[in-house]
Amino acid sequence: MRIVLAVIRREYLQRVKSKWFLVSTLAAPAFLIASMVIPILYETGQEENRRNLALVDETGVLADRVGPRLEEAGYNVEVAPAGSEDSLKAQALDGELGGFLVLGTDALASGHLTFYGSQGPGPIRGMTIRGVVVQSALEARIAETGSEVDLDALFQGGSMDLQILEEGAGGATEDEPAFVGVFIGSMLLYMVVLMYAAAVMRAALEEKTGRIVEILISSIRPWQLMLGKIVGVGSVGLTQLAVWILCGTLALTLGVPAAMASRPDLIDPEAISQALPNAGLVTLFFLLFLGGYFLYAAVYSAVGAMCSTEEEAQQAQFPVVIFLIAPVLFLMPVMENPGAPFSVIMSMIPFFSPVLLYARAGAGTVPFWQIGASLTLLYLSVWGVAWVAGRIYRVGILMQGKRPTLPELWRWVRET
Amino acid sequence: MSSSGLNGTPIKLKGVTKRFGTHTAVSSLDLEIPKGSVYGLLGPNGSGKTTTLRIMMGILLPDEGEVELLGGAPGVQQNDRVGYLPEERGVYRKMKVRDLLVFLGEIRGLGRGEAQKRAMDWLKRLDLAEWAEKRTQDLSKGMQQKVQFIGTVLHEPEILILDEPFSGLDPINQEVLEGIVREFQARGTTILFSTHLMDHAERLCERVCLISKAKKVLDSDLKQLKRRERKGLVAVEFTGDDSWLRGPEVTEILEVENGIHLVLKEGADHQGILRRGVDAGVRIDRFDLVEPRLHEIFVRHAGEPDNGGPLGSTGETSGKRGVR
């Protein structure tokens, strides 16, 4: 055990201390944070006045509806009487006003308006302004008929409750699944498993190409070396994930409120909270990450051990990559039909379940026994695959030269 | 600790054969390394030395025969009692020198603190202290080799198995290494090393085993071997006519730097020549049975012309010219 710990510590420290780790760990969140912070800084700094808008309403009925809606979207709106355009133009040119809107008489019929400003409002603001006018015009028209309509809800695309029917039970009500969040989660699983498991392959090669293995192998049993390397690289992966999750949490708790304060038109807090996975999904994510990582890491370490050069290993890993990519191809169909027999079967296959079980669980209700069965199969096959991989590793790690053929590999596995 | 001392032979090979495909690397080899001895495994390149050592370490399994290391089958269980320096020795290139040594000590059962301390002591001894915090890839090849040697002995093993420990070192460091080997010898460590450099073997070994083409050719105490092999070469220095040198016993007369070497016919007695010299009235300053150098013995037994080994043609006598 002490020997395995020494291998783990060596592997972990060597990787965490490298520049590559620092860059790849910090670059992703830095980019994410920069893409959030820079627009905010830009916004709050020099562009304060762009949010001051004046409104000239020639219809006589829209100002009361357009004004409050624009204020809600973060603008300061001042309603100006018709005929004040000249003084408004001067203010707009001074930079006091970001611009002014003239709602002509046709605004009620077609949603048409004119924006005056020293520069255009930009595509996103333009969309917001147009949307507000259209919604207000519709509202005014519907109000004439005396009907009651929740236009805000309609314009957000409506909503749908799900009633999952189970025999004998009352059925459970749940929120509509958040497709984007589940899709991102599944892809993230695929990426981290691929990234770190492939790193194990290069780690296994390190002893061979560096000709260190013979020094080690008189002191370490091959499985100890293999386990140490897999756990070491996996710990590096968890460290990196932890840093990223920490950054993500910081961005959500600090960044989003700040961003909302400056640009409410850009951020919909409800959409964000809907995209976030709940505690159950997070737990499942880590269980699947660990299972998938160990499964593929075992295979990859065997691939690394049977090759002698990096180039050879790149070729030899091809069949493994196919196993990893296959579930990504099935991702959309499985999310569309999470309960279909095809989806159920695919999410039970250990090499696919890390990506597909998560997709199913996120996209719909998966019976508890299926999650349990899928995870059990995954962890059992980790055991089996590690056993086979360990035997290949044991022989391969000392081999130099030609890559073994499949019959040779089979002999390595059988030999004691 | 005493299991190795039961019969005084910590390393034993019996009828060991190892084949790679159709090539036989080691052929029914018997070997017994006495406890506390310095044992040289000699042979030309490709003769099977490295394969033999790997079998001893349990890295390779023999196809036939038995191996015993410290009273048991070789394997990781003797880890902390054996130090093995393989011929293929690399380093973790990104690691710092001291971290690497501590790691090697740890996997051989040393505690971290103890490994740290011993690593620094050794680095100081081998003039590498200032490199302790440098990455191993910044070291020269010779320095890397010294670091590897430290890694091999850090846990103070009872047995040292060194595969070509001197190759790649400059003469000064070769001498340093020889000194350390002697030191371990004085402590009672059993040392087995392979080499194709006869000088080191000649200076260090008590016993040598010569293998050629996968087979054992010689296995003997070095002093006895030399005595056995010395018949047949006489060094002579004299002033006067040289006709007395010629006779039925002498097959060849060689001119060397400080005199003449006579090669005698097998089984011939040198007394007759000496008598002729005295009778001829020449002044004889030296008449000496020459101890053969290990190199010559090596070439004589392993260096047949069809051997193809690099040492087959570079015998000690090649620089000398016959005067007959």
Image (cartoon, coloured by chain):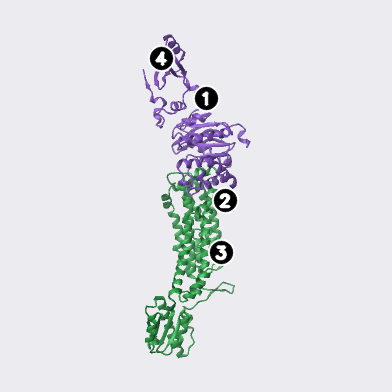
Label 4, label 3: how many angstroms apart (C-alpha)? 100 Å
Q: Secondary structure at mark 2?
A: helix
Image position, residue B231 (x, y; %):
47, 19
Residue denoted by label 1: B223
Query: Looking at the picture, does residue A80 appear above or below residue B112?
Result: below
Disc nearer the start of the sequence (3/2):
2
Q: Quadrant of the C terminus of chain B?
A: top left
Q: Are marks 2 and 1 on the same chain?
A: no
Give chain A's shade: green
Q: Is residue A85 above or below residue A238?
A: below
Q: What residue did someone put label 3 on?
A: A283
Any mark on residue B239, and which? Answer: 4
* Mark 3 or 1, closer to the camera: 1
The crowding category of the residue bearing disc 3, from other C-alpha atoms within 10 Å (few below 14, some 14 to 19, many at least 20), is few
Task: Please tell me the colour of chain B.
Answer: purple
Q: Earlier in the sequence, mark 4 or mark 1?
A: 1
Q: Amino acid at mark 2?
A: Leu
Tell me which amino acid carries mark 4: Thr
The front one of B200 and A303 is B200
Q: Nearer the viewer, mark 4 or mark 1?
A: 4
The residues bearing labels 2 and 1 have C-alpha atoms spaced at a distance of: 48 Å
Output the chain of dot 3.
A
Q: Which residue is mark 2?
A: A5
Q: Chain of mark 4?
A: B
Q: What's the residue at 42%, 52% (across, down)?
A: A314
Asked if badge 4 and badge 1 are on a common chain, one would say yes
Q: What is the C-alpha distance between the residues marked 2 and 4? A: 75 Å
